[in-house]
Amino acid sequence: MDIRIEQASLRWQHHCVFSNLNLSLPAGHWTSILGQSGVGKSSLLQLLCGIADDAEIEGRIECSDGRPLQGRVAWMAQQDLLLPWLSLLDNVLLGARLRQGTPSAEQKELGHYLLQQVGLADRALSLPAQLSGGQRQRVALARTLFQDQPLICMDEPFSALDAITRLRLQDLAAKLLSGRTVLMITHDPLEALRLSDRIQVLRGTPAHLTDPLLPSGTVPRSVDAPEVLEYQGRLLRMLAEDTP
Amino acid sequence: MMSLLRGVTLGLGLLLLWQLIVWLTQAPHFILPGPVRVLETLINQFPLLMKHAGVTLAEILLGLLLGTLLGLGSALSLVTWGSLRRWLLPVLVISQAIPVFALAPVLMLWLGYGMASKVAMATLIIYFPVTAACFDGLRQTPTGYLQLARTLGASRRTLLLQIRLPAALPAFGSGLRVAASVAPIGAVVGEWVGSSTGLGYLMLNANARMQVDLMFAALLVLAVMALGLYFSVNLIARRLTPWVSESTSSNFRGHSA
């Protein structure tokens, strides 16, 4: 399912951050948006997720199947947002728990399978407090996958992790999310280049989106691939120009 | 094991200090009886003390139960209905300007000399701290949890029961701890104002008859009861919130630490 945002505009403290912004998310592609903080990229993502209430953002969202997007987005944030009173398995099953109370046997099986996919099968009954930051974000990834929605929105999902853990999680995410429609917000050009099919930069005042950059090759791309390094330099220069 | 040793040492130290003050000041036994004398009375009058302690304990527990349920209910309603909050919150704050002690005679007048007026006192005295703690806890749910629940399609009711309420449990636990430590005050003050049973009655009665050793024995029983209550509630609160690390859940840890 293709998704388009049209005529999105964001006002913050009585000035215009962006207006007339269009963004398309082709089905099955991983789109990343890079940009400085405060440029409104998180608000754009929250608009898609239906959780933007503080910012004065508006825009029209169109799905190629003609139905509204509301309720069909899986959101993964920078914080893992695991509920500390639920076991890892129950955290993965949270969507089912909140909508129908008790998850079915198949859903539990799926939860176990997803925990196994993120390498935490033997910790299913642990509490989140017993996990490291990287492990917690793995569970958040499993929870996002469990929702099985046509769009996955990730807001700097790995930026709170150390460099090595971040690379490992990027590999895992690339493997588990292949073939899905993903929108990822990040400020790390390398992260975007390793994982995305399309990269756009949100820049300027009022902000606009650059034409998509389309890196070649299969994801996750190697950190030292020549193309990745070249693009990384270009993107970093572009982002540095924006810094006042 | 270390903390048990520490507790025993602390207890013995306090008894020794007490005895020292008695020796140094040469206070007559009807002003300040020594610990030995009080312990003797405690043993001799044990059935009498227990009879009154049972009544006081029942009042405290009933007050604690009612006050907690009322407080929790009020906090939930305040969070659920925003318009109610604007009307009820000022009333709650104003009600705190009236000292509960000043209400004791009126409660006696309305509810009689029996247990009801004491339970009402204990309920009233803990109602506000419990409500305030629960309300604060329910309001301070991390926004991330709420946003996540919204993207997961949770209804308002589910949001309250499955996200806000469990997230407020640590705050609820602190409210409960405060309640456990002030509920005995309510019950005893109620007994002082007018009653025919209970430790408060016994203390006042013994005091009037210059049986200061009996008064001290009653005080000791009351203190042990209050401590026991506090630590039980603390234990329950910790069981309710196993994810909260022990060092942050309470600064006062009992023998179980």
Image (tube, rainbow, N blue to C red):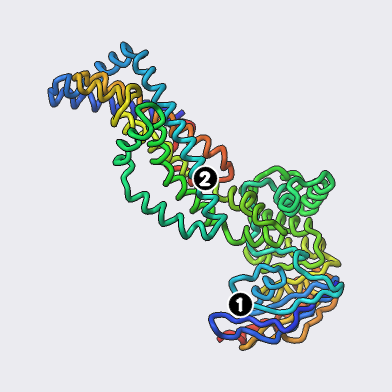
Residue at which label 2 appears: B72
Q: Is residue A108 left or right of residue B129?
A: right
Q: Quadrant of residue B39?
A: top left
Q: Is residue A188 left or right of residue B17?
A: right
Q: Are marks 2 and 1 on the same chain?
A: no
Q: Quadrant of the N terminus of chain A?
A: bottom right
Relative height, residue A177 to residue B46 (above, below): below
Q: Nearer the viewer, residue B9 or B251?
A: B251
Q: Quadrant of the C terminus of chain A?
A: bottom right
Q: Nearer the viewer, residue A62 or A136?
A: A62
Q: Is residue A161 visible?
A: no
Query: Could you tell me which secondary element the residue under label 2 belongs to?
Result: helix
Relative height, residue B46 to residue B72 (above, below): above
Q: Is residue B77 left or right of residue B129?
A: right
Q: Which mark is residue A56?
A: 1
Task: Give percent across and percent down for residue A37.
Answer: 60, 77
Numbered circles on residues, count:
2
The chain ID associated with circle 1 is A
- Residue drawn at the location 78% of the way across and 56% of the way down: A146
- Residue drawn at the location 74% of the way across and 54% of the way down: A95
